């Protein structure tokens, strides 16, 4: 499902543990790390899609997590020209996402990546709050930053950790 502007509706999942570290998954067969995410089917709400994606990608059930919050509005990113599939109709130029912040209420051995025939992740680790902004593929950095900024007060009511500013984003922009 692509909207009239060319954006595919999607959910993003930021899963944290008791130490407020974030789940960071490496995609199968790639050196690409990201948060779990996935498309919203036409018959689903964003929350329903989030729970489906959570089970498909990490193997967790609703009772194994607590929803801390979500972004208020859609956060969008555009795909770089080389990633746009021009032969597909309707044309998808990017994604619009609702991001959910969840807390894991289960042991790590409950995580299971082979719930589907084509797993998303093959490896994972817990990372510091701002680390994903530095490590995700360049065209998703803006949406990751906006999601983490909006959701930080829910996880850090005393104030979010200071984000190390560097020239990393400028140096690695393509």
Image (spheres, rainbow, N blue to C red):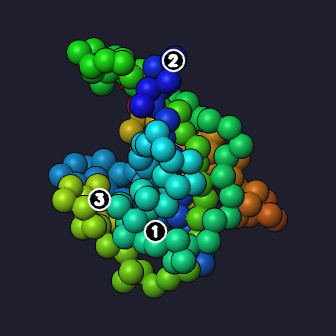
Residue 119, percent across and down?
A: 25, 58
Tag on residue 166?
Answer: none
Given this view, does label 2 or label 3 mark the residue nearer the observer? 2
At a point 51% along the width and 47% down the height, the residue shown is 44
Q: Nearer the viewer, residue 25 or 54?
A: 54
Name the residue tied to disc 2: 4
How packed mark 3 is, by other alpha carbons closer than 10 Å (few <14, some 14-19, many 20 or more), is many
Q: Residue at x 42, y 56 (%)?
A: 53
- Whether the residues at callouts 2 and 3 have beta carbons within 8 Å, the answer is no
In the rendered structure, find residue 126 and report the number of the disc placed on it: 1
Give coordinates of residue 76: x percent, y percent: 55, 30
Q: Nearer the viewer, mark 1 or mark 2?
A: 2
Q: Earlier in the sequence, mark 2 or mark 3?
A: 2
- The reply to whether discs 1 and 2 touch (Cβ–Cβ < 8 Å) is no
Query: Callout 2: few (<14), some (14-19), or many (20+) C-alpha neighbours within 10 Å?
Result: few
Residue 171, visible in the rendered structure: no
Q: Residue at x 50, y 24 (%)?
A: 3
> How far across and how far down the image is residue 156, in percent?
74, 63
The residue that appears at 51% across and 17% down in the rendered structure is: 5
Question: What is the quadrant of residue 14 in the picture?
Answer: bottom right
User: What is the spatial separation of the Cα atoms under label 1 and label 2, in whole angstroms?
Assistant: 37 Å
Quadrant of the image containing the N terminus: top left
Residue 28 spot, x, y in % from top left: 22, 54
Q: Where 56 falls versus 134 (above or below)? A: below
Q: Furthest residue to the front? A: 43
SS label for mark 2:
loop
Q: Residue furthest right?
A: 158
Marks 3 and 1 in Cβ contact (< 8 Å): no
How many numbered marks appear?
3
Say left or right for 60 vs 128: left
Which residue is label 3 attached to? 121
Q: What is the CA distance from the residue labelled 2 to the residue labelled 3?
A: 31 Å
């Amino acid at each position: 499902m692509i909207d009239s502007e060319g954006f595919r509706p999607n959910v993003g999942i930021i899963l944290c543990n008791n130490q407020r570290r974030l789940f960071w998954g490496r995609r199968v067969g790639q050196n690409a790390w990201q948060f779990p995410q996935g498309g919203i089917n036409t018959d689903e709400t964003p929350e329903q899609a989030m729970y489906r994606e959570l089970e498909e990608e990490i193997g967790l059930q609703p009772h194994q997590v607590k929803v801390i919050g979500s972004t208020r509005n859609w956060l969008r990113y555009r795909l770089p020209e080389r990633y746009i599939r021009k032969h597909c109709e309707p044309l998808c130029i990017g994604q619009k996402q609702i991001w959910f912040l969840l807390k894991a209420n289960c042991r790590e051995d409950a995580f299971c990546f082979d719930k589907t025939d084509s797993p998303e992740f093959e490896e994972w680790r817990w990372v510091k709050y701002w680390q994903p902004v530095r490590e995700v593929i360049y065209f998703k950095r803006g949406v990751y930053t906006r999601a983490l900024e909006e959701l930080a007060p829910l996880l850090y009511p005393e104030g979010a950790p200071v984000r190390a500013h560097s020239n990393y984003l400028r140096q690695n922009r393509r």
